[in-house]
């Protein structure tokens, strides 16, 4: 596999460098509201009482499987005591691993959950804007159907993206299309051979050639995205590299200061906060 593919296949945030300075002057913030922190009154609410403060989530009832599963777990007090075991600044905060309950500081976390997965409910019109509630999952190589973890979820923090950085976030989708095109299999085979031989100079040249061939695909993908979505990513923020790859089933409607505090926690190995951030209680408000 090309290093390019390896880099893009991960759920990382390297292509979404914070671009506040490059986008903050695109529009008058006082005249346009690009926030995305409200939800219909009929969406069920769940409160996560954490050691940092409260996060109030609204669940999208159209995402029937994920919403029903999440409410079931909350009602059973499943999430009580769970840590936010993975926190990546300008990207997301993740929790829902039962192994994190009373976990020691050196515990390896991130693979725990119930003995089932939830079939994906990925929809192209549900985006990973800042505050989006989405289901975590295993990688495509072991989970090609993109089914969701039975319990782990994340809340997007993300960053602001101008057009250039937005296009960079689409590289994963573009490469997936490139890799699956039978006409490009020679590039894939050549990349694998060069990687195995350790010829990094030739591999880098191949990557540059592939990136040039992907540009029309990236432009095509970018052109299909509604302008309102682009503007919301530019001025509200999020992680568009996750779009069409993870199931979004709700959003944060209250507690953005808490979200910000959690994402700013210093982290160590495995992106785990050095100071435990715990869900004291998850409950459905009356």
Image: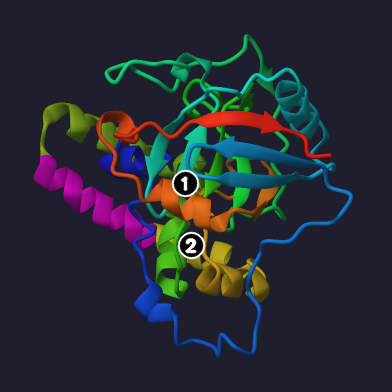
Is residue 157 visible to us here?
Answer: no
Element type at mark 2: helix
Q: Quadrant of the C terminus?
A: top right
Name the side, left or right, on which 53 lies relative to 47: left
Viewer-proximal residue among 39 and 221: 39
Residue 84 image offset from top left, x and y in percent: 46, 33
* Image position of 198 (left or right of 260): left
Q: Find the residue positioned furthest to the right.
A: 42
Q: Residue at label 1? A: 92
Please give the name of the residue rendered at 35% of the width and 41% of the height, measured from the top-left corner: 5
Q: Residue at x 25, y 56 (%)?
A: 208
Q: Residues within 10 Å of mark 2 (few under 14, many from 20)?
A: many
161 drawn magenta: no
Residue 68 in the image: state x and y as whole percent.
Answer: 80, 28
Q: Secondary structure at mark 1?
A: strand
Residue 85: quarter of image: top left
The structure residue drawn at horizontal position 25% and vertical position 34%, both measured from the top left corner, is: 268
Residue 229 visible in the snapshot: yes
The x and y percentages for residue 211 are 34, 57
Residue that mark 2 sits on: 218
The part of the chain drawn in magenta is 200-213
Q: Nearer the viewer, residue 40 or 192?
A: 40
In this rendered view, identify the residue nearer to me: 262 or 65: 262
């Amino acid at each position: 596999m090309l290093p390019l593919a390896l880099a893009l296949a991960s759920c990382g945030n390297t292509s979404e460098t914070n671009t506040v300075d490059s986008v903050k002057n695109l529009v008058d913030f006082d005249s346009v509201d690009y926030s995305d922190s409200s939800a219909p009154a009929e969406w069920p609410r769940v409160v996560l009482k954490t050691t940092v403060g409260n996060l109030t989530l609204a669940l999208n009832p159209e995402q029937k499987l994920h919403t029903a599963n999440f409410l079931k777990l909350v009602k059973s007090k499943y999430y009580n005591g769970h840590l936010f075991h993975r926190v990546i600044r300008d990207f997301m905060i993740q929790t829902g691993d039962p192994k994190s309950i009373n976990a020691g500081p050196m515990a390896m976390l991130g693979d725990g959950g119930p003995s089932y997965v939830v079939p994906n409910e990925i929809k192209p019109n549900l985006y990973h804007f800042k505050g989006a509630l989405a289901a975590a999952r295993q990688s495509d190589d072991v989970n090609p159907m993109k089914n969701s973890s039975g319990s782990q979820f994340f809340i997007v923090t993300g960053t602001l993206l101008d057009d250039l950085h937005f296009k960079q976030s689409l590289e994963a989708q573009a490469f997936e299309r490139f890799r699956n095109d039978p006409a490009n299999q020679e590039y894939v085979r050549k990349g694998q051979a060069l990687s195995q031989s350790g010829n990094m100079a030739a591999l880098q040249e191949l990557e540059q050639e592939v990136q040039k061939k992907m540009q029309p695909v990236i432009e095509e993908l970018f052109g299909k995205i509604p302008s309102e979505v682009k503007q919301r990513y530019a001025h509200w923020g999020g992680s568009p590299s996750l779009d069409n790859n993870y199931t979004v089933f709700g959003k944060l409607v209250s507690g953005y200061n808490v979200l910000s505090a959690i994402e700013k926690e210093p982290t160590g190995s495995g992106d785990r906060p050095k100071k435990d951030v715990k869900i004291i209680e998850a409950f459905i408000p009356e």
